[in-house]
Image (cartoon, helix red, strand yellow):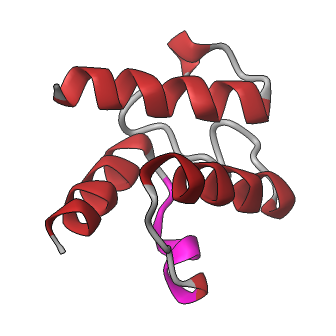
Amino acid sequence: MADITEQEIKKIISEITEVPVEKITPDADFFADLEVDSLKAIEIVAALEKKYRVVIPEKDIPKIRTLNQVLEYTKGMKKE
């Protein structure tokens, strides 16, 4: 099931950033490697919040910079 979630998140990020899915590696930095700007970061957060029915506090957004960090964050949110 973790693979499905990872693939779903990669697809969301790819659609918003227009970066091919294969370039979204677990450790690729959204800002440095994928050239995500702050508006696209907010779009990604909004899409994740809607899809997984979670609320990501604004203060946490800058801390979530890679696919691995998104996965860890969403795992933590689902446990609560």
Q: Position of residue 4 (x, y in %)?
A: 29, 21
Q: Position of residue 10 (x, y in %)?
A: 50, 27
Based on the picture, tell me whether residue 40 belongs to the magenta stretch. Answer: no
Measured along the vertical axis of the image, is residue 67 above or below residue 75? Answer: above
Based on the picture, tell me whether residue 61 belongs to the magenta stretch. Answer: yes
Q: Which residue is nearer to you in this view: 56 or 18?
A: 56
Left or right of residue 47, residue 36 in this image: right
Q: Quadrant of residue 23?
A: top right
Measured along the vertical axis of the image, is residue 29 above or below residue 54? Answer: above
Q: Which residues are magenta?
A: 59-65
Q: Give the total number of marks visible in the rendering.
A: 0
> What residue appears at the point 43 percent right and 51 percent down from the top-left corner?
52
> Looking at the figure, which quarter contains the N terminus?
top left
Q: Position of residue 74 (x, y in %)?
A: 32, 57
Q: Position of residue 44 (x, y in %)?
A: 66, 50
Q: Which residue is nearer to you in this view: 58 or 33?
A: 58
> What residue appears at the point 76 percent right and 34 percent down from the top-left corner?
17
Question: Overall secondary structure of the magenta stretch?
Answer: helix
> Looking at the figure, which quarter contains the C terminus?
bottom left
Left or right of residue 80, residue 74 in this image: right
Left or right of residue 24, residue 32 in this image: right
> What residue appears at the point 49 percent right and 74 percent down from the top-left corner?
55
